[in-house]
């Protein structure tokens, strides 16, 4: 099987980034209510999925990593919707296992809120949704990465792998910021600044 991998230094940096974000919310005190449990639970799952993506890439299991890109995005969007937009009845229904609205409806509701009025999340969805769905549901776009002139084998490019990792890193940073936003304390604000610093470092910007 063809295996295109990131360098060990890149993998180490990705793991260090995930750990830094984990520590940013570790032992963060949150209010105890159903809305917080639902939203913060989604954000925590987003972090866990990001960690899984890194580990799958490290193990050369690229199909699994790519399949989780939509999942990490949806976990984050659901968390923000539950925190900022859902009614109490919708929160309770969600925690009891009912499906939330479709992602389009959640984004429309979120972007009525001042925090998201620039429609950044919708722009992310427009650019990436078709590919995310194809990777998650094993569409033709994903199968293309397994069909080569020599047979059926993994054929992801290093650039695609890096792009997948960077996307997950953007979303996990937003998820951590979401958790810290729920905490809404001076300590959380300081942690949020550190998260922003970690993310800028990953991007290589000041």
Image: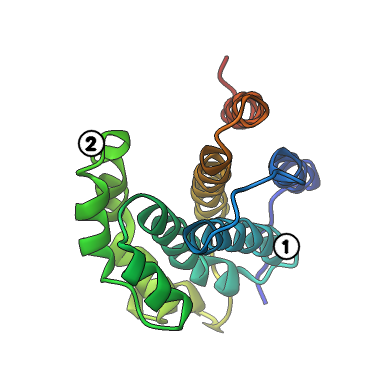
Image quadrant containing the N terminus: bottom right
Taking the spot 68% from the left edge, 67% from the top edge, the residue there is 56
Residue assigned mark 1: 55
**Which mark identifies residue 117?**
2
* Residue positioned most to the top: 206
In the depicted structure, whether residue 27 falls above or below residue 141: above
Front residue of 61 and 32: 32
What is the quadrant of residue 13 in the picture?
top right
**Circle 1 SS class:** helix
Front residue of 177 and 128: 177
Q: Is residue 110 left or right of residue 72?
A: left
Residue 186: % across, % down: 63, 24
Residue 133: % across, % down: 35, 72
Taking the spot 38% from the left edge, 82% from the top edge, the residue there is 98
Front tag of 2 and 1 = 2
Taking the spot 39% from the left edge, 56% from the top edge, the residue there is 77
What is the quadrant of residue 47 in the picture?
bottom right
**Circle 2 SS class:** loop
Image quadrant containing the C terminus: top right
Res. 148 visible in picture: no
Front residue of 150 and 72: 72
In the depicted structure, whether residue 109 falls above or below residue 166: below
Q: How far apart, in angstroms, are the residues tagged by discs 2 and 1?
A: 34 Å
Disc 2 and disc 1 in contact, CB within 8 angstroms: no
First of labels 2, 1 by sequence position: 1
């Amino acid at each position: 099987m063809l295996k295109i991998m990131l360098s060990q230094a890149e993998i180490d940096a990705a793991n260090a980034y995930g750990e830094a974000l984990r520590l940013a919310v570790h032992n963060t005190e949150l209010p105890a209510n159903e809305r917080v449990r639902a939203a913060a639970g989604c954000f925590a799952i987003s972090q866990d999925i990001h960690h899984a993506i890194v580990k799958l890439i490290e193990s050369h299991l690229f199909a699994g990593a790519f399949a989780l890109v939509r999942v990490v995005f949806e976990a984050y969007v659901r968390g923000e919707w539950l925190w900022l937009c859902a009614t109490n009845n919708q929160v309770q229904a969600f925690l009891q296992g009912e499906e939330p609205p479709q992602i389009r409806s959640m984004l429309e509701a979120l972007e009525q809120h001042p925090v998201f009025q620039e429609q950044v999340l919708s722009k992310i969805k427009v650019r990436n949704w078709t590919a995310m769905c194809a990777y998650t549901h094993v569409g033709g776009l994903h199968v293309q990465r397994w069909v080569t002139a020599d047979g059926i084998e993994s054929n992801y490019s290093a650039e695609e792998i890096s792009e997948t990792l960077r996307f997950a890193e953007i979303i996990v940073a937003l998820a951590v910021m979401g958790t810290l936003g729920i905490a809404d304390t001076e300590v959380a604000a300081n942690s949020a600044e550190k998260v922003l610093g970690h993310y800028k470092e990953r991007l290589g910007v000041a």
